[in-house]
Image (tube, helix red, strand yellow):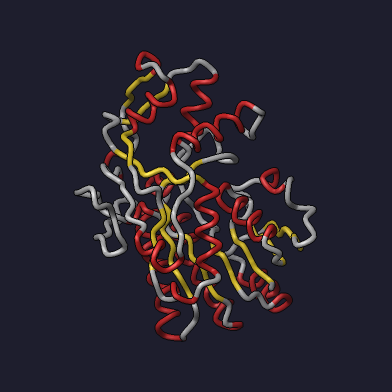
Amino acid sequence: MNILLTGGAGFIGRWVAKRLLDEGYNLWVLDDLSNGREENLTEIINHPGFKQFIKGSILDESLLSSLFDAHRFEICYHLGASINVQDSIDEPRTTFNNDTIGTFYVLEQCRKYNTKVVFMSTCMVYDRCNDETGIDENHPTKPASPYAGSKIGAENMVLSYYYAYGLPTVVIRPFNTYGPFQKTGGEGGVVAIFIKNELEGKTLNIYGEGTQTRDLLYVEDCARFVVSAGFDDRVNGEIVNAGLGRDISVNDLALLIAGDSSKILHVPHIHPQSEIQKLLCNYGKAKHLLGWEPQISLEEGIQRTRKWIVEGGLA
């Protein structure tokens, strides 16, 4: 089976690539390296199933067309995207082009060959959670940033191709994913950033009051979920969440990692208007349709991530 993975040189993409190769599939990776990096693929690029790394953009329709024409992919895992909330606020055009228009270009190629589309969305499309039952797929959405708005627009296009053309598609919404190979600087890597700062004797800076909560999903659990969505027809035409099913405040996360409140500093929030105060995943649908549930606890995941960073993980 021939599979295309966009964004495969990114943090989650790297783990999805590894799992697909371990399961014996032929894999092509497309990434423009605006967020990903080739070093993420060092350990797997010589695998016999790894057919090609293509440095290129999902906005390059001729490149996409040539790839699909040559290899007639059976599944496209579409993870390629602009993912930084603040960047989307500062310069929304890039995020909209990559996340919405780029997804449309991918869909058009998949429609030609009836290629199944697994579209990576985000928990950032949701409004805040108000109770302990967690956020399920029917929870209200709230595009509080152009990033979230672009993802919601793309989600709707992905589902429209299922209804209009019968194309097998699924929208997946993993919650806050962390683990080895996540960058230790920049947005999205709160666990990695906190661990790196703690190891270097630096303060752990928390945006705002730190009472906001996150549902933190270990990356190998996330990759197992992503891959499984491509091979099960029961999720076609569906939106499916994945998370740990447990949330933790950023304050408590920092204390868990630092072990000392004196090492924690609160700083002004860079985009309070786009903050989601409570994120807690209800993954019941993934469990029901895919038989998926997380296997790695937050404490074990932090330990694994710390070990990777200590052993010289990519900065």
Quadrant into which the N terminus falls: bottom right
- Residue situated in front as seen by the camera: 145 or 72: 72
Residue closest to the far bottom: 165
The residue positioned 41% from the left and 58% from the top of the image is 173
Quadrant in the picture for residue 69? bottom right
- Residue situated in front as seen by the camera: 224 or 12: 224
Q: Is residue 184 above or below residue 204?
A: below
The residue positioned 30% from the left and 42% from the top of the image is 275
Estimate the x, y position of residue 53 in percent, counting from the top left: 72, 58
Estimate the x, y position of residue 264 in percent, counting from the top left: 37, 20
Q: In this view, does 278 lie above or below 315?
A: below
Estimate the x, y position of residue 288 in percent, counting from the top left: 39, 66
Q: How many marks?
A: 0
Q: In this view, does 298 lie to the left or right of 108?
A: left
Quadrant in the picture for residue 224? bottom right
Q: In this view, does 279 lie above or below 266?
A: below
The residue positioned 75% from the left and 60% from the top of the image is 50
The residue positioned 62% from the left and 26% from the top of the image is 310
Q: Is residue 128 left or right of residue 60?
A: left
Residue closest to the far left: 130
Quadrant in the picture for residue 153? bottom left
Estimate the x, y position of residue 267 in percent, counting from the top left: 33, 25
